Image (tube, helix red, strand yellow):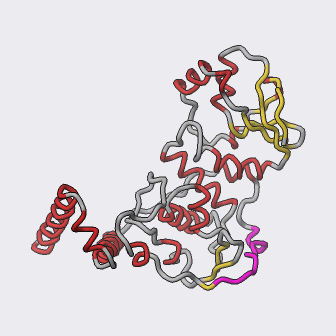
Amino acid sequence: MKIREIPLDDLVIEPSLNLRDRLDDFTVERYADSWERLPPITIYEVEKRYLIADGFHRHAAAVMLGKRSIKAEIIQGTMTEALDFVASVNLFHGLPLTRAERRRAVEVKLKLHHDWSDRRMAEELAVSRELVAKIRRQLIEGRQIPNLPGRVGADGKLYTSAGLPRDANERLPKGPAEPDDVTTHEGSRGMPGAAAVAEPPASKATTRTADTSSFSEFPVDPRAIAESGPVAVTSATIDEMLELMSKQIMQIIAWTQAEGFVEAYRAARPNARGLFHTAAIKLAARADQLRRG
């Protein structure tokens, strides 16, 4: 890995390596104004071509300023390695990804590493395990990734459990169920014992490596992976929605029964306790309305 000045004319913009919907004009102008303080872009040298992997806005700023070259960090690798890199890089710096862009990054990462556990994938991308599990299920149902009998954790061990992809050890986050656009997977704070209630026992682990050699029907071309559209998902049935909401409500009840919750509740601000009571009363009233029809 080395850093040097690369002529702009030598750089290749590979569409499949740009997971953004579009460039942000304000960001390009801001980068142009602070050009001297910008870090190098990252390029992958693949088959003697310099492919931009990180720094599309900085490259656009260089073009706007009429620059002939740009400082770049050069990594020699393959197209797949470059795509693997871009699926993670903008989750942690630069212009934040939109909800759709972040989802696309998770989809790409799952297609490249479908043997990773939901927990490992969530930690790698700083998103919720609920989001990873949801996208994984949709990709499996759309036959874009295989439904493996086990997943590889961050420790390199293969964790096996029944009923994948609905693996309780991977599906349940430590905090409340998170929507698609939440980018954190921290546990709930200020409630001792809550994480222990929400987190089920770990699956059995072995030291074997997941074998994906038999899944040749799934695409391995990185361009095909990047350019494949999102899976069409059917809407949840009312039974599925009620089951999900019931699980979420029971999880909240379990938190209130956790060791130390009563003491923490008494120490909470009156406004916070009031919000909790108001929400609980509204939920009970709405449930009674539904029951009465």
Q: Nearer the viewer, residue 86 or 205?
A: 205
Is 44 on the left-hand or right-hand side of 286?
right
What is the x, y in percent for residue 47? 88, 42
Q: Is residue 128 visible?
A: yes
What is the quadrant of the C terminus in the image?
A: bottom left
Q: Main secondary structure of the magenta part?
A: loop
Residue 263, relative to residue 37: is it above or below? Answer: below
Q: How many marks?
A: 0
Residue 74 included in the magenta stretch of the image: no
Q: Residue 94, located in which quarter of the rendered image? A: top right
Q: Give how far across and how far down residue 209 sits, in percent.
A: 75, 76
* Residue depicted at 41% across the width and 60% down the height: 178
Q: Magenta segment range?
A: 205-216
User: What residue is at 53 percent from the left and 52 percent from the top?
Assistant: 103
Asked if 282 appears above or below 51 in the picture, the reply is below
Q: In the current view of this chain or complex, which residue is farthest to the top?
A: 66
Q: Quadrant of the N terminus?
A: top right
Q: Is residue 60 left or right of residue 171?
A: right
Residue appearing at x 71%, y 52% in the figure: 84
Do we see residue 239 in this rendering?
no
Q: Position of residue 196 (x, y in %)?
A: 43, 77
The reply to whether the magenta stretch includes residue 214 is yes
Question: For residue 213, what is the image quadrant?
Answer: bottom right
Q: Which one is in front, 92 or 63?
A: 92
Residue drawn at 82 percent across, 49 percent down:
78
